[in-house]
Image (cartoon, helix red, strand yellow):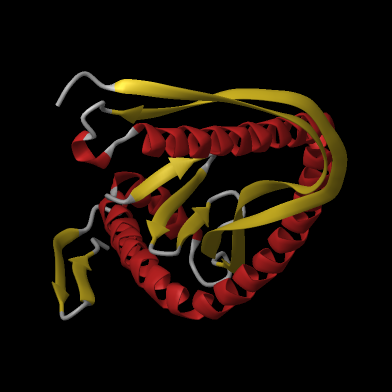
């Protein structure tokens, strides 16, 4: 095997070709949505004033209850309960959250004509001794084929460049149109999903109310106990006994006559 030799074939072509292309822009928009259902229950008609006063102190000391803006709130799975001292109401709230995602699409056809002079050089390799069956004849064919492939590549590049330039000209308008479509679709998707979440929250409110009332009434029982004990102490009661059995609170004391 000796040193390789090369054959070069120059090729030229005047390109004048019409083209058409479809330009599309897609804009995606997302938003968080929430649906809720709530119920308020007044307590002042069923619970005495001293107990409601003690209730605030009890809730302030219990784990899980947080005082926020004058109300006491306890988070639940899928909602929360809140006691509002100003209105003396228990509020039960079921909440559901989700995310909606939509797309807006805008499409426009473009066309044009590419006109350019293409010049390339194809290369083929051979050996004087014909090593590897690479002769001057095979090198000539290889160089010719390589030149034709390069011409086709340059043709495709010229058309791609023209299409890219045309797409850039209309890109901003297409993006605005796609974004406007996505915005309108998002508003509708939000409204639809919020309504679904509201309905689901209303269905959940009953079960959540059972859980929330159990928590609240345990705190209310503590408030009853503290209110009664405070009354007994204020009257100088003797023999005060406070016992809880099977969820029933028993308080005994003697008042001096």
Residue at figure coordinates x 45%, y 49% from the top left: 72
Name above or below for residue 205 compared with residue 216. Answer: below
- 150 and 121: which is toward the camera: 121
Name above or below for residue 246 compared with residue 173. Answer: below
Horizontal side, residue 159 vs residue 9: left or right: right
Query: In the displayed image of the protein, which residue is found farthest to the front?
Result: 129
Name above or below for residue 170 compared with residue 229. Answer: above
Quadrant showing the N terminus: top left
Is residue 172 among what the camera can see?
A: no
Residue at figure coordinates x 65%, y 38% from the top left: 156
- 179 and 66: which is toward the camera: 179
Residue 150, picture quadrant: top right
Residue at figure coordinates x 53%, y 62% from the top left: 95
Residue at figure coordinates x 49%, y 56% from the top left: 82
Where residue 206 sits: x, y (%)? 50, 80
Horizontal side, residue 121 vs residue 19: left or right: left
Quadrant showing the C terminus: bottom left
């Amino acid at each position: 095997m000796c040193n390789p030799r090369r054959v070069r074939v120059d090729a030229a072509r005047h390109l004048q070709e019409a083209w058409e292309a479809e330009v599309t822009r897609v804009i995606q928009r997302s938003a968080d949505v929430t649906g809720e259902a709530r119920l308020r229950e007044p307590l002042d008609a069923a619970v005495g004033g001293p107990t409601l006063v003690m209730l605030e102190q009890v809730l302030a000391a219990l784990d899980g209850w947080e005082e926020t803006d004058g109300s006491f709130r306890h988070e639940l799975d899928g909602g929360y309960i809140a006691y509002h001292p100003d209105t003396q109401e228990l509020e039960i709230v079921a909440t559901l959250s989700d995310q909606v995602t939509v797309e807006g699409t805008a499409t426009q056809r473009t066309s044009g004509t590419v006109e350019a002079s293409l010049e390339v050089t194809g290369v083929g390799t051979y050996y004087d001794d014909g090593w590897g069956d690479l002769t001057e004849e095979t090198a000539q064919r290889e160089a010719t084929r390589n030149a034709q492939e390069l011409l086709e590549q340059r043709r495709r590049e010229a058309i791609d460049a023209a299409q890219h330039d045309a797409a850039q000209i209309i890109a901003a308008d297409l993006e605005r149109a796609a974004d406007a479509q996505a915005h309108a679709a998002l508003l509708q998707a939000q409204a639809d999903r919020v309504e679904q979440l509201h309905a689901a929250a209303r269905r959940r409110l009953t079960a959540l109310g059972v859980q929330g009332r159990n928590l609240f009434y345990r705190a209310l029982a503590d408030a009853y106990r503290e209110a009664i004990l405070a009354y007994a102490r204020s009257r100088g009661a003797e023999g005060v006994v406070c016992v809880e059995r099977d969820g029933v609170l028993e308080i005994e004391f003697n008042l001096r006559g």
